[in-house]
Image (cartoon, rainbow, N blue to C red):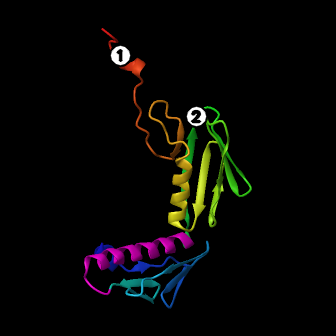
């Protein structure tokens, strides 16, 4: 992972970064994000570039080096343009709507599911069958999308369920279509 860690991070225009103690703060038009850097690693901010240096050539330090660089880069992208995940609901009577600070989802269960929207995340439903999740933290957006998808994963026979936009659900033929000869 050291190849990733060696690359300097170019800050997008309108994004400012500051380092105090072992905490890096990245601020942009969408908001502000902070991350605690492990004390062994050094972070330098010069000319709209951030460089992360590791203390040694040990395998663990190389891996952590790449991780820290990726997390800071994700913060810079998040505060400038943000992150977005789109989900699509397929099924008769399946729908979603935002009600206050919760997402109300009606699936084939006997009760509606209420998903509490986490801090720093906004959820919109442009159509009752589409869910758009936005935020500046890539991990929070991805986690919220995965949790919503887990309420009813797409099933392979009819394709009903909640899936990511662009996700391909592998379909299976039902037993009536396979043409098994029956008992004989």
Q: Residue furthest top?
A: 184
Give the label on residue 133, or none.
none
Q: Residues within 10 Å of mark 2 (few under 14, many from 20)?
A: some
Q: Is residue 102 left or right of residue 22?
A: right
Which secondary structure lies at badge 1? loop
Q: Can you give x and y, in whole percent of width and height, for residue 171 in the image? A: 41, 33
Depicted 181 relative to depicted 24: above or below: above
Which quarter of the figure is the C terminus placed in? Answer: top left
Which quarter of the figure is the N terminus placed in? Answer: bottom left
Which secondary structure lies at badge 2? loop
Point out the tag, 2 or 1, that comes first from the N-terminus. 2
Q: Are marks 2 and 1 in contact (CB under 8 Å)?
A: no
Q: Is residue 150 left or right of residue 60?
A: right
Q: Is residue 21 left or right of residue 53?
A: right
- Front-most of 167 and 38? 38
**Span of residues in magenta:** 55-79
Give the label on residue 91, or none.
2
* Residue ID at (58%, 34%): 91
Q: How many marks?
A: 2
Residue 63: in magenta span: yes
* Residue ID at (56%, 57%): 144
Q: Residue furthest right?
A: 100
- Front-most of 23 and 27? 23
> Circle 1 sits on which residue?
179
- Front-most of 172 and 79? 172
Q: Residues within 10 Å of mark 1 (few under 14, many from 20)?
A: few
* Residue ID at (31%, 87%): 55
* Residue ID at (62%, 38%): 107
Depicted 112 relative to depicted 31: above or below: above
The secondary structure that dominates the magenta segment is helix
Depicted 127 relative to depicted 45: above or below: above
Q: Can you give x and y, in whole percent of width and height, for residue 183 in the image? A: 33, 11
């Amino acid at each position: 992972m050291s190849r990733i860690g060696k690359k300097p991070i170019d800050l997008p225009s309108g994004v400012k970064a500051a380092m105090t103690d072992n905490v890096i703060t990245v601020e942009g038009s969408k908001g502000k994000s902070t991350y605690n850097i492990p004390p062994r690693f050094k972070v330098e901010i010069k000319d709209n570039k951030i460089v992360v240096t590791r203390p040694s050539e040990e395998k663990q330090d190389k891996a952590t080096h790449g991780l820290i660089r990726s997390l800071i880069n994700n913060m810079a992208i998040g505060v400038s343009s943000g992150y977005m995940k789109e989900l699509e609901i397929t099924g008769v009577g399946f729908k979603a709507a935002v009600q206050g600070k919760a997402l109300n989802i009606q699936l084939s269960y006997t009760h509606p599911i209420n998903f509490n929207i986490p801090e720093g995340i906004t959820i919109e439903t442009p159509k009752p069958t589409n869910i758009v999740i936005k935020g500046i933290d890539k991990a929070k957006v991805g986690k919220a999308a995965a949790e919503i998808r887990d309420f009813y994963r797409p099933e392979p026979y009819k394709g009903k369920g909640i899936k990511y936009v662009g996700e391909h659900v592998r379909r299976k033929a039902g037993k009536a279509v396979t043409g098994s000869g029956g008992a004989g």
